[in-house]
Amino acid sequence: MAHIADALKDKGNTAFRNGEYLDAEELYTQAIQKYSRNPLIFTNRANARLKLQKWDAAVNDCLKSIDLTASGQNHKAFYFLAQAQLALNHPHEALSSALTAYDQVRSPAPSTRTSPKDLETFSAFVLKCKKAKFAVRDRERLRRQGDLRAELEETLERAKKVELDHVTRSLDAMRLGNVEAKEQSEEIFATYDGKRAELRKVFELADPTHHKPREVPDHLVDMITFEPMHDPVITKMGHSYERATIYEHLKRSPTDPLTRDPLTINDLRPNFGLKAACDEFWEGGASEWILDW
């Protein structure tokens, strides 16, 4: 039955490439009914279900795929799992899954095919999850202080979830196509991001002492540890890392962590411009709250 399942999986892959996600999901389901021990089929169905915004079902497929993978190396399943968890507003779990996926891509098993593009994609998503987790912690901090801004931000989050759930239900009922649902979801995220930014600006202007922004700019983050840098160095390809972190990495592997190009300590140079930005960040009081990051 495994060969029949493979044939159905191939048909599902074709449907997925053509943007026919419902058909792909159905073909993957048929493949699983024929042979349920192939983790790749569950991973592929999870990806189709992500496109269909079936978050819980995608989580279940990813967990099944991971369970079936004896080696534990299943970076795509962990990556898709992180996406579904983040969509379900579980940033803590999403960050854990994303970090696992990223670690597996950085140190792949001999039989695993990965590319520098995977490293860039996965590292960017880890950072997205880390920011989401930090945002939740910051709202919890403000709520414990009885802060009105936290209550208003949570109201915005609930309203956003209602609108996103409506899009998902419309997609399930086929009142919306995949492209329309994606566009509407992106518009909802953009709208509420704008509302939250405007709300924070109002509170910052009214009470700058207690509402000073607590943000870590992307360009200050070391993409190995995902922590803000103190002493950045730059590679010949233009990537910057925390000095101590990249030195430790080069002891294990003489390559750039993000591109896998050959790299030695002698190829590194201090990044003075970025160092000035890091100093300004830390001198601005970041050390008082960075543990929440």
Image: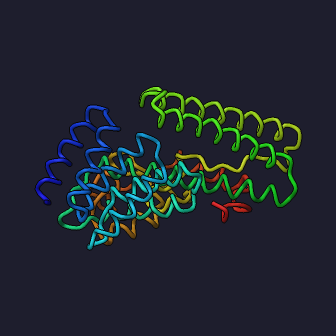
Picture coordinates of residue 232 (x, y %)? 49, 55
Picture coordinates of residue 10 (x, y %)? 17, 45
Picture coordinates of residue 195 (x, y %)? 71, 33
> What residue lies at 51% left-to-right and 59% top-to-bottom?
95
Q: Specify the quadrant that holds the C terminus.
A: bottom right
> What residue lies at 23% left-to-right and 67% top-to-bottom?
109
- Left or right of 65 on screen, residue 289: right
Q: Specify the quadrant that holds the N terminus.
A: bottom left
Number of marks in picture:
0
- Left or right of 87 on screen, residue 120: left
User: Between residues 249 and 98, which one lies in front from this camera angle?
Assistant: 98
User: Between residues 8 and 164, which one lies in front from this camera angle?
Assistant: 8
In the rendered image, which quarter is residue 37 located in? bottom left
Image height of 271 relative to 255, above or below? above
Picture coordinates of residue 216 (x, y %)? 62, 50
Residue at the left extreme? 3
> What residue lies at 65% left-to-right and 39% top-to-bottom?
162
- Left or right of 95 on screen, residue 150: right
Q: Identify the image's colour scheme: rainbow, by chain, secondary structure or one colour.
A: rainbow
